[in-house]
Image (spheres, grey):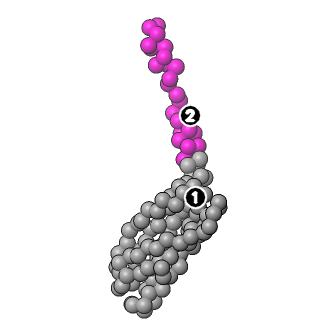
Amino acid sequence: MPSNLRVLAAAVVPASMLTMLAAGAAQAATSSQAPVHRSSLSCGLPAKAKANYSWADGRTSVTVYFNNHCSHKVSAKLHIKNAIGSNYTLCMTTNGGTQGKKKFSIGAARTLTAITKGC
């Protein structure tokens, strides 16, 4: 048998083995996901509407997803906990009736802990 055919024959894997490999890879991917955090801020107008936020902990940055149901701009204060220095805040303002995301580079030793009203 030519050498290139022997290599090809050795690379053949039974279909049942492929299924087990795919399932194991999917399980490993889901177990390492960071938990999602959520926050909401009440609107002035319309009554009972909210600006909603969600984020997950990242390594050096955090992406904040927002959905502003208010009819006006909403300013949110992002509280950053710093493991090696002073804690600080960032400001995020979104227009009324918009949704989207905003990425913040915060560094490896920092995490977003809360979102509150105002800046």
The residue at the point 48 percent across, 59 percent down is: 105
Label 1 SS: loop
Q: Distance between the residues labelled 1 and 2?
A: 29 Å
Residue at (42% x, 65% y) in the render:
102
Q: Residues within 10 Å of mark 2 (few under 14, many from 20)?
A: few
Q: Mark 2 points at which residue?
A: 17
**Residue 75 visible at all:** yes
Residue under the point 37% across and 82% down: 73
**In the foreground, 44 or 2:** 44
Judged by depth in the image, the label closer to the viewer, 1 or 2, is 1
Helix, strand or loop: magenta stretch: helix
Q: How many labels does the image show?
A: 2
Image coordinates of residue 71 in percent, x first then y, are 35, 85
Are the residues tagged 1 and 2 within 8 Å (C-beta)? no
**What span is in magenta?**
1-26
Tell me the element at label 2. Answer: helix
The answer to whether residue 16 is seen in the rendering is no
Q: In the image, is residue 111 part of the stretch drawn in magenta?
A: no
List the residue tagged with mark 1. 34
Tell me where residue 97 appears, x and y as whole percent: 34, 79
Mark 1 closeness class: few <14, some 14–19, many ≥20 residues within 10 Å: few
Is 7 rendered above or below residue 65?
above
In screen coordinates, is 105 left or right of 73?
right
The picture places residue 58, in percent across and down from the top left corner, at 54, 57
Looking at this rendering, what residue extends furthest in the front direction? 85
Q: With respect to residue 109, does 20 lie above or below? A: above
Give the mark, 1 or 2, whose residue is nearer the N terminus.
Answer: 2
Amino acid beneath label 1: Ala
Q: Nearer the viewer, residue 94 or 47?
A: 94
x, y percent for residue 45: 39, 90
Compared with 105, 67 (above or below) is below
Q: Quadrant of residue 79?
A: bottom right
